[in-house]
Image: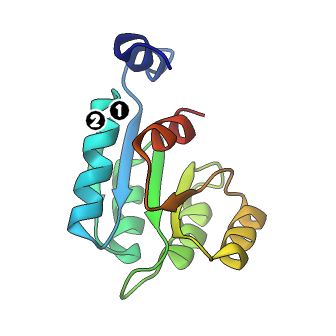
Amino acid sequence: MMPPSDRIAALKKRDGSHVRVLVVDDSIFMEKHMSRILTGAGFDVIGNAIDGGQAIEMFRELRPDITTMDITMPKVDGIHAIDEIFKIDPAAVIIPLTAIGHEKIVRALLAKGVKHYIVKPIQPDRVIEIVRD
């Protein structure tokens, strides 16, 4: 594992600015946990949304570099939000968070253009590795 200072340096964009992340999760605990992991690794968490509808609006407004997206949420779920965000920006980088046992959902998301996903319960080192990739 890289020393923390090297890991943070590796997470900056070419222009030297931090990678900007939107965290979407209806669980306040999970949202805060993800935000702490990401900010601790040198990412700039620019917003937090509690459902897919709010995520779509915040994505449109903030244009994050990366969006982490819980799949199971009330009101507007993560799958619908991912579809809508890809309509706004087909090159958007979205990393879904899903529970163990949702292989069918994961396959569908990969077919939509998602490159990675995070399985809950989350492992901080794995989160950083996936988001960095």
x, y percentage for residue 89? 58, 55
x, y percentage for residue 85? 53, 64
117 lies left or right of 126: right
x, y percentage for residue 120? 47, 63
Q: Which residue is drawn at 67% across and 57% down?
A: 114
x, y percentage for residue 31? 28, 59
103 lies left or right of 34: right
Q: Residue at x 33, y 26 (%)?
A: 42
Q: Residues within 10 Å of mark 2 (few under 14, many from 20)?
A: some
Q: Residues within 10 Å of mark 1 (few under 14, many from 20)?
A: many
Q: Quadrant of residue 36?
A: top left
Spatial CA distance of label 2 from label 1 is: 5 Å
Residue 69's place in the image compared with 38, above or below, is below
Taking the view exactly as shown, the residue that stands out farthest to the right is: 111
- The residue tagged 2 is 39
Q: Is residue 16 visible?
A: no
Q: Which amino acid does label 1 sit on?
A: Phe
SS at circle 2: helix
Q: Which residue is drawn at 55% across and 54% down?
A: 94
In this view, the residue in front, 82 or 127, is: 127
SS at circle 1: loop
Residue 130's place in the image compared with 102, above or below, is above
In this view, the residue in front, 84 or 7, is: 7
Q: Residue at x 65, y 55 (%)?
A: 90
- The residue tagged 1 is 43
21 lies left or right of 65: left
Residue 107's place in the image compared with 122, above or below, is below
Question: What quarter of the picture does the C terminus occupy?
Answer: top right
Q: What residue type is labelled 2?
A: Thr
Q: Is residue 76 visible?
A: yes
